[in-house]
Image (cartoon, helix red, strand yellow):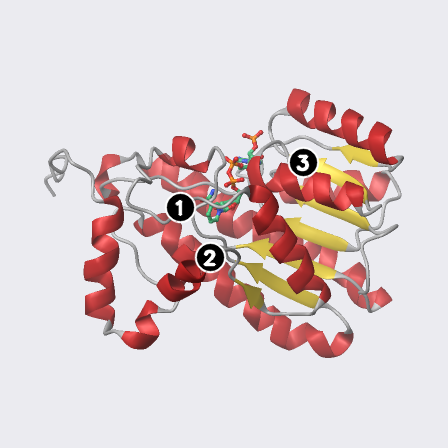
Amino acid sequence: MESFKGATILVTGASSGIGEAFACALAKRGANLILTARSEDKLRQIAGALSEKHAIQVNVFPGDLSRPDMPQRLWAQVQSASLSVDVLINNAGFGKCGHFLGHDYQNYQDMLNLNINALVSLTHLFLPSMLKRGNGGVINVASTAAFQPIPYLATYSATKAFVLSFSESLWGEYREHGLTVLALCPGNTSTNFADVANADVTRMTKAESPETVVEAGLKAFLKGRNHVIPGRAVNYLLANLSRLLSRRRVIGITSGLFKPDPAPPDIPKM
Ligand SMILES: NC(=O)c1ccc[n+]([C@@H]2O[C@H](COP(=O)([O-])OP(=O)(O)OC[C@H]3O[C@@H](n4cnc5c(N)ncnc54)[C@H](OP(=O)(O)O)[C@@H]3O)[C@@H](O)[C@H]2O)c1
């Protein structure tokens, strides 16, 4: 794919943060958009502003992607509107920070459904028509958390390790068919993520703007890259620590990033 102009691009999690920045950057480049997230009002506000400013077509299909039936429903809505997706951006996701047993299992179930199951399902649903055209692809938003285990962010970092591995495997399968599957791996980025995760990011590297992350992602996608770590060199270094140190040592370092101050909750008795 040489440019995004005139392409139809589906962005999940487009109501804020990195997803909203994707919508704005792509609208500026003349792409038509399909936006989804749970917050319908925010999506309609973003859609109205972007379609007016850039004279593009923007469709809004709100929904909760942690619900197992939502990816299929979204795909059916796109078909009924006679839209054909050139690029799918699987961006919606969230984390929960703290002791593993400090959160109800439902939090993890929703996280696994959103960060992994919806992403795989949407990729499976939208890839065939891209393959037929031999053009386009998928941007999956992973994280620098994908590269190593992170105590106190265990389930989230494992979901992102899945996203990175899955995306790069598909990159290897489909690049000879003209498609790109990119894993975008941001470090700390100034969005609502930390509030939703209840994460203290003061021990993290300085936050990038979502716009910087998106620019790096769009550039890497057009270059046909398999993954990209946007922003400062320190993000690249952190992501590649396990190439330099033993895994045990790396876990020792990442343990310090999100260790909560209060004592761990009681371990349930078996
Ligand atoms: N910010 C960081 O430091 C950072 C670093 C690395 C990777 N990431 C990744 O970047 C992606 C975007 O996050 P962000 O940083 O932009 O955070 P954000 O501002 O909280 O945005 C998350 C987006 O996902 C949507 N979303 C959440 N739950 C959803 C659900 N159940 N169904 C549908 N949409 C849902 C949210 O919209 P609604 O609430 O309206 O549904 C929102 O649009 C995530 O995959 C995150 O893991 C973030």
Is residue 268 in sight in this rendering?
Answer: yes
Tell how many labels.
3
Where does residue 242 sit, x and y in percent of width and height? 31, 71
Residue 206 numbered mark, or none: 1
Which residue does the numbered mark 3 point to in the structure image? Answer: 36
Q: Quadrant of the N terminus?
A: bottom right
Residue type for callout 2: Arg
User: Is 253 on the left or on the right of 125, as rendered?
Assistant: left
Tag 1 near tag 3, CB within 8 Å = no
Q: Residue at x 83, y 44 (%)?
A: 79
Asked whether 121 or 165 is in front, the reply is 165
Question: From the Cβ of disc 3, is ligand 1 less than 8 Å away?
Answer: yes
* Mark 1 to mark 2 CA distance (whole Å): 9 Å
Residue 197 position (above or below residue 212): above
**Pointer 3 or 2: first along the chain:** 3
Tag 1 near tag 2, CB within 8 Å = yes
Residue 144 numbered mark, or none: none
Q: Secondary structure at mark 1?
A: loop
**Pointer 1 or 3: first along the chain:** 3
User: Is 133 on the left or on the right of 42, as rendered?
Assistant: right
* Mark 3 to mark 2 CA distance (whole Å): 30 Å
Residue type for callout 1: Lys
Residue type for callout 3: Thr
Residue 71 position (above or below residue 166): above
**Pointer 1 or 2: first along the chain:** 1
Q: Residue at x 40, y 46 (%)?
A: 206
Is residue 12 in sight in this rendering?
Answer: no
- Circle 3 crowding by C-alpha within 10 Å: few under 14, some 14–19, many from 20: many
Q: Residue at x 59, y 55 (%)?
A: 140
Which residue does the numbered mark 2 point to in the structure image? Answer: 232
User: Is 244 on the left or on the right of 2, as rendered?
Assistant: left
Q: Residue at x 85, y 28 (%)?
A: 52
